[in-house]
Image (spheres, grey):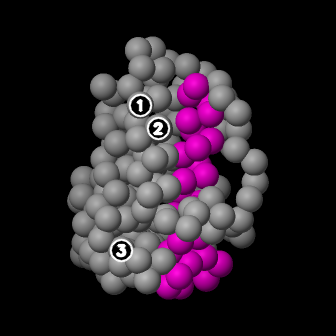
């Protein structure tokens, strides 16, 4: 297993820990992202995972639809199904060297996992914040995500991506720095 896949799987299980602790009645809570509720945020993550699954398996690419519809009536159950489907697809010999198309050009699945895991980690924090659960983001994963985001530079800023960085003290915990860099108030 590559380090990128390890980090991606760790991100999936960080999100899984959040999803499992969200109370049924909290999915409509507003997330730190003004555009989405907790349910819509999870729908966004699920849609991205479905796109990755399609790329890995040469399956049909999911069409655009509202994030709440992607999450479905039971977001946790939808999450469980999509999580398992993607993990199964990533657990195939040779899949990490497969070339796929991404918003930043063609790259291997391994490279894509290493570049885009920060999105799921950010949204795990969003859902946790919206629903009052602990995101429990591993410090090493937050540090790696922050490094990846730094490497993207201004490409992570703008409408539909992240707002401007929020200022935090230099000695702030790495999770707070990660959250702040994504334009959220820790």
Question: To which residue does mark 3 refer?
Answer: 22
What residue occupies the far front of the structure in this picture?
A: 73
- Asked if residue 18 lies in the magenta stretch, the reply is no
N-terminal-most mark, 2 or 3: 3
- Mark 3–mark 1 Cα distance, whole angstroms, equals 25 Å
Query: Which residue occupies 34% across, 42% down?
Result: 9
C-beta proximity under 8 Å, tags 2 and 1? yes
Question: Along the horizontal axis of the image, is 169 left or right of 95?
Answer: left
Q: Is residue 25 left or right of residue 69?
A: left
Q: Position of residue 135 (x, y in %)?
A: 31, 69
Tell me which corner region of the image, top left, top right, bottom left or bottom right, holds residue 59: top right
**Mark 2 neighbour class, 10 Å CA radius: few under 14, some 14 to 19, many 20 or more:** some
Q: Are marks 3 and 1 in contact (CB under 8 Å)?
A: no
User: In this view of the protein, can residue 166 be seen by the observer?
Assistant: no
N-terminal label among 3 and 1: 3
Q: Residues within 10 Å of mark 1 (few under 14, many from 20)?
A: few
Q: Marks 2 and 1, Cα distance to the nearest angstrom?
A: 5 Å
Q: Secondary structure at mark 1?
A: helix
For image coordinates 75% across by 54% down, the residue present is: 64
Res. 181 mark: none
- According to the picture, the residue beneath numbered tag 2 turns out to be 85
Report the residue at 44% width, 58% height from top.
Answer: 77
Magenta stretch, residue numbers = 28-57
**Cβ atoms under marks 2 and 3 closer than 8 Å:** no
């Amino acid at each position: 297993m590559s380090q990128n896949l390890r980090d991606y799987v760790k991100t999936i299980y960080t999100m899984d820990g959040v999803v499992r602790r969200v109370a049924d009645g909290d999915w409509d809570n507003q997330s730190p992202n003004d555009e989405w509720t907790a349910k819509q945020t999870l729908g966004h993550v699920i849609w991205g995972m479905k796109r990755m699954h399609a790329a890995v398996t040469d399956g049909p690419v999911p069409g655009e639809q509202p994030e709440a519809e992607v999450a479905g009536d039971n977001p946790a159950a939808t999450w469980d199904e999509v999580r398992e489907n993607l993990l199964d697809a990533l657990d195939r010999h040779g899949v990490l060297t497969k070339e796929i198309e991404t918003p930043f050009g063609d790259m291997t699945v391994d490279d894509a996992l290493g570049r885009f895991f920060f999105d799921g980690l950010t949204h795990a924090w969003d859902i946790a914040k919206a629903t009052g659960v602990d995101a429990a983001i591993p410090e090493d994963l937050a540090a790696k995500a922050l490094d990846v985001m730094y490497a993207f530079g201004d490409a992570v800023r703008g409408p539909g991506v992240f707002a401007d960085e929020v200022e935090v003290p230099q000695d702030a915990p790495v999770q707070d720095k990660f959250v702040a860099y994504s334009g959220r108030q820790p």
